[in-house]
Amino acid sequence: MSKGNIRLLSDTLAKARAEDRAALVAYLPAGFPTVDGGIEAVKAVIAGGADVVEVGLPHSDPVLDGAVIQTADDIALRGGVRIADVLRTVREAHEATGAPVLVMTYWNPIDRYGPERFAAELAEAGGAGCILPDLPVQESAPWREHADKHGLATVFVVAPSSKDARLATITAAGSGFVYAASLMGVTGPRESVGNEAQELVRRTRATTELPVCVGLGVSNAVQAKEVAGFADGVIVGSAFVKLLLDAPDLPAGLAAVRALAGELAEGVRRS
C-alpha cells in the first residue's frame, strides 16, 4: 500500500518555523492553461520559493472561488481535464521538486470517483493530502479513515464566522495544517488582509497544535509579510493564476509566477 506524504508536509512547515518564517503555500489549478502547462507552472512556483503547493481540481461550480480561479477552471474543463490529469500533476510536480503537493477540491468529484480509490491513487502519486473546503466535518469520518490509512493529510477550512466550539471540532478532525480563510467571501486579491485574519489565527491556535495557514486575499509581498507576522503559512492563489491568465504565452507566464513566488518568499521572512 502506497503511503502519502503527510510527514513531508509536517516537516516542511516545521522547517519554515525553525527558520523563523512563515511557509509559502501556492495554489494553482490542474489543467490550466493546459495539463502540461499546469505542471510546469507548479514547478515554477516551487523553483521561485514556494514551500508547498495546492493543486486545484477544477470544478464546474466553484462556489468559494472568485472570478480569476473560475476562469482558469473553465479553461481547464473545456480542455478536458480529468482526475487522472490532476493526479499526474501531483506526481510529476512532486517527483521533479521533492516538495509536498496537496489537492484542493470540492467533495463532489471525490465522492463520485470513490473516496477510497481517490485516497489510494493520491498517495501512490506522492500527494501529501487534501484540502476539502465544503466537506462538513461531521460527515468526514469515512474520508478521514481512508486518508489516514494512506498517509494523507485532511485539511479543513475555518472562517472568521466560526464559533470557538466549532473551531475546536474542526481542528480536532483535521491534520497537516488548518486553512484559515482571512475573510468571509470568495477567493481573490484584496487591498488589505485585515485584522479578522489575525484574530482568527489566535482563536484557532487556542484549539490546536497544528500549523495555521492563512489564505484568501494575499497577492503581494507586503501582504505576505503582514500575514507572516501572525500565521504559520501564507497561501496565495489568485495572484499566480492571474499572471498566467494575463501572460501573452506560457514561457512569459511561467517567468511571471516564478518571479512572484520569489517576491512572496522574501515577504514571508519575518526579519
Image: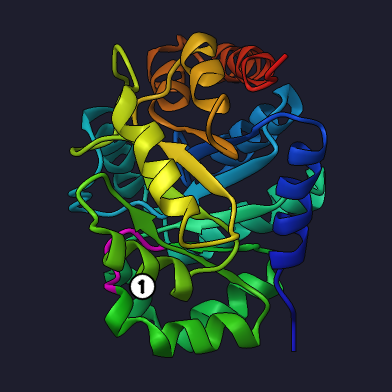
The quarter of the picture where the C terminus appears is top right
State left or right for residue 22 relative to residue 134.
right
State left or right for residue 258 relative to residue 246.
right
Q: Is residue 99 visible?
A: no
**Number of on-image labels:** 1
Which residue sits at x=66%, y=73%?
123
Say if 142 sits above or below 32 in the image. Answer: below
Viewer-side residue, 168 vs 261:
168
Q: In the displayed image of the protein, which residue is found farthest to the front?
A: 206
Percent x, y of residue 175: 56, 68
Tell me which corner region of the image, top left, top right, bottom left or bottom right, holds residue 2: bottom right
State left or right for residue 188 relative to residue 55.
left
Which residue sits at x=74%, y=52%?
94
The kind of residue on which mark 1 rests is Thr
The stretch in magenta equals 132-136
Dominant secondary structure, magenta: loop
Viewer-side residue, 255 vs 77:
255
Q: Secondary structure at mark 1?
A: helix
Q: Mark 1 — residue?
A: 169
